[in-house]
Image: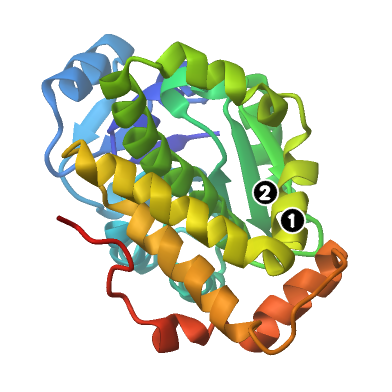
Amino acid sequence: MRIGIIGFGEVGRCFAPALSQLGDAPLLLCDPRPSRAAEDLARDLGASLVARVSEDLAACDLVLSCVNGAAAGDVAGAVAACDAPGQVLLDFATAPPQVKRDAAQALQARGRHYVDIAIMGAISIGGVGTPLLAAGEEGADAVQAARALLGRAGLRLDWLAEAEPGDAASLKLLRSVFTKGLEALAVECLVAAEHFGVRRALYQVLADVDGTPLPEFLEMLVSTHLVHAERRLAEIEQAELQLRNADLPVRLLPCVRSLFGATTAAMAQERLTETPSPDQALKTLKAIGLSGARAAGEGSAVDPG
């Protein structure tokens, strides 16, 4: 199997050494602005490194698109323009689901196979073993051959059942809502904890969170949110005030306060006394649409002075 990689950044450079030993010919690499690290690795692998997608790519049976999300659609279009029937494109870009659906349609119309792949972890930590979630033409012989080759290279590819291209990307972006939001909160919280000299002590008082399975913890938060939003809102206001009084950065807490304020306003006429199930809570939150977020406004309930 002849293999091409488009985008020779961190992801492409991670996969290339493992794949270079498995193909029937040297890798074909494509990057319009390769870094010094990319050029050095290409030379070490004996791989061809070109600046743009061209007909040379038509000789590849398997192509990995490892570009950023903004370039995903253009790259898929350029690949589709090459005459390469039966070729498999594995799209690792974090792009909007519709971009991936459009790419799949364009390639399939040209007799090609398209697989939407979402990287579900940090390549810098997990390397080639980082979990990968795939959606697309799982049953096609060419795709199965590509999957087997990736497995021999050490890539962990899990297929999303009964899914279409774009579904893996959708889950990736939902994961980002959580992980990137948590990252931002961690920055805000730990900067403050370090300022007050209590970072290690903070980890100790978070031990109950660490000891609870994540799905159970998340559903507990959602279920109790409707019942305790008003009380928790007061805690958020005090926490925000503490940070402001210390002249510490406060960017996330006003957003958190706004959401809790919206729930409090929306539930003012229907105070719950019992904790709903996660399903019931999510149904209610969807019904109110947190439309109260607009009613509550974005202004601060805490004196920034």
Q: Nearer the viewer, residue 244 or 116?
A: 244
Q: Which residue is mark 2?
A: 143
Is there any visible trace of residue 237 in the rendered image?
yes
Indicate left or right for 143 with 72 as reference: right
Quadrant where the C terminus sits is bottom left
Q: Amino acid at mark 2?
A: Val
Q: Is residue 16 above or below residue 96?
A: above
Residue beneath the point at 18% across and 14% down: 40
Residue beneath the point at 53% across and 73% down: 101
Q: Secondary structure at mark 2?
A: helix
- Packing grade of label 1 (10 A; few <14, some 14-19, many >=20) is few
Q: Which residue is mark 1?
A: 140
Residue beneath the point at 88% across and 64% down: 277
Query: In the rendering, at what x and y percent does residue 56 appear?
Result: 30, 46
- Could you tell me how many numbered marks the image carries? 2
Q: Amino acid at mark 1?
A: Ala
Q: Are marks 2 and 1 in contact (CB under 8 Å)?
A: yes
Quadrant where the N terminus sits is top right
Q: Is residue 131 above or below residue 303?
A: above
Q: Which quarter of the picture shows residue 77?
A: bottom left
